[in-house]
Image (tube, grey):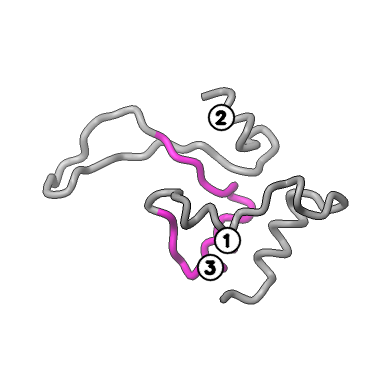
């Protein structure tokens, strides 16, 4: 997980890895398991949540990845935080 944390920028405050609980459909009790997911950092998570219509991803599939712009294809003079701020302040579709 250390390599994935590095990729997701957890040490730079980009994202956070948090434990999650999984419950299979039709089962009411939580099942113990070692699972985690990446979430926006607390410093911008609420704004990101609102900007995204208060919806999250059940899965990060090709559909969600379509809107992702690779770092090499973004303006290089802007930081990660600049890009986040621009996205949050932009009008939603």
Percent position (x, y) of residue 71? 73, 46
Q: Give the residues in magenta.
A: 36-57
Q: Which mark is residue 4?
A: 2
Image position of 62 (left or right of 87): left
Q: CA distance from mark 2 to mark 3?
A: 26 Å
Q: Residue at x 64, y 76 (%)?
A: 91
From the image, tell me which residue sits under label 1: 48
Q: Does 92 sit above or below residue 45?
A: below
Q: Secondary structure at mark 1?
A: helix
- The answer to whether the residues at label 3 and label 1 have Cβ atoms under 8 Å apart is yes
Q: Looking at the rendered structure, which numbered label has been put on residue 20?
A: none
Whole-percent x, y for residue 52 in the image: 52, 66
- Residue for point 56% across, 29% down: 4
- Whether residue 39 appears in magenta in the rendering, the answer is yes
Compare marks 1 and 2 and give the one earlier in the sequence.
2
Question: Dot 1: few (<14), some (14–19), or many (≥20) neighbours within 10 Å?
Answer: many
In x, y percent, where is residue 37?
44, 40
Q: Gap between marks 3 and 1, in whole Å?
A: 5 Å
Quadrant of the snapshot with the C terminus: bottom right
For numbered disc 2, what is the local secondary structure? helix
63 left or right of 51 in image: left
Q: Is tag 2's residue or tag 3's residue first in the polypeptide sequence?
A: 2
Q: Circle 3 — which element? A: helix
7 inside magenta stretch: no
Q: Position of residue 56 (x, y in %)?
A: 44, 58
Dividing the picture into quarters, in which one does residue 2 lie?
Answer: top right
Label 3 crowd bin: few (<14), some (14–19), many (20+), radius 10 Å: few
Q: Residue at the location (74% across, 49% down)? A: 80
Q: Quadrant of residue 55?
A: bottom left
Q: Which residue is mark 3?
A: 50
């Amino acid at each position: 997980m250390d390599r994935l944390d590095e990729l997701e920028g957890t040490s730079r405050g980009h994202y956070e890895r948090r434990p999650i609980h999984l419950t299979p459909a039709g089962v009411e009790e939580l099942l113990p398991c070692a699972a985690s997911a990446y979430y926006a950092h607390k410093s911008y998570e609420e704004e990101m949540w609102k900007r995204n219509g208060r919806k999250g991803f059940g899965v990060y599939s090709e559909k969600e990845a379509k809107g992702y712009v690779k770092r090499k294809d973004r303006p290089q003079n802007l930081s990660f935080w600049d890009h986040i701020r621009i996205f949050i302040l932009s009008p939603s579709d």
